[in-house]
Amino acid sequence: MKEQIESKLCESLKGRVKFNSTRYRGSHDEVGRSWVTFDNEIIHDFCTVKLRYKYNTTANMLREETNSLDWRAPEQKKGYYEACRIAGKEMEFQGIHNQFEFYKAIEEYLNLSIDEAMRSTNPIIRSISWFDKRLGKRRLIRIEEESNIIVIKFRNFRLEAEGLIDE
């Protein structure tokens, strides 16, 4: 998959952007992380452990604030699960995803046209599409601004590499 995704990179990013992945076989569930580098600097990390930690921390904080700590108690059940939903939305907003979401997005991306990739509801797919050689300079300039943190980050790296914005 690494070769396939890197073969779709535009000329200005070839050799500068790398897609990486590892698994922590010694961990209890053998999860790991994936990351993307630009000029050997990590620009985004898709770490399963980080996602779980931040998600659980956020959900637990929300549960404490609403006194919804026990999912078995009927009066707390709704608040308990609402905290999970809000924590999930917050992870999405912050651009925190796990390595399996990254793998799934790449797999899907490799089978999409550039138009489908740019319109995808998946922010990881939209992010990767900014690095695609099928996306020309004229089109880069015309694309509307985005609110997703990962998409903005990848967009700015591409525009900078093409000399369309300053650092």
Image (spheres, helix red, strand yellow):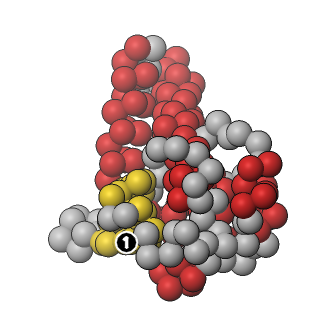
Q: Along the line of sight, which residue is nearer the eye, 58 or 108?
A: 108
Label 1: few (<14), some or many (≥20) within 10 Å?
Answer: some
Residue 35: image location, x then y, percent: 39, 62
Q: Residue at x 50, y 75 (%)?
A: 14
Res. 32 visible in picture: yes
Residue 28: image location, x then y, percent: 23, 64
Please count the marks in the image.
Answer: 1
Q: Quadrant of residue 47?
A: bottom left
Q: Along the line of sight, which residue is nearer the eye, 156 or 5?
A: 156
Instruction: Give the side of residue 22 with respect to residue 137, left or right.
Output: left
The residue that label 1 is drawn on is: 21
Instruction: Give the side of residue 41 with respect to residue 74, left or right.
Output: left
Res. 77 visible in picture: no
Q: Residue at x 55, y 36 (%)?
A: 93
Q: Amino acid at mark 1?
A: Ser
Instruction: Give the side of residue 134 with respect to residue 60, left or right.
Output: right
The extreme bottom residue here reads: 3
Residue 149: image location, x then y, percent: 54, 41
Judge whether 78 appears above or below 98 on screen: above
Q: Residue at x 25, y 69 (%)?
A: 24
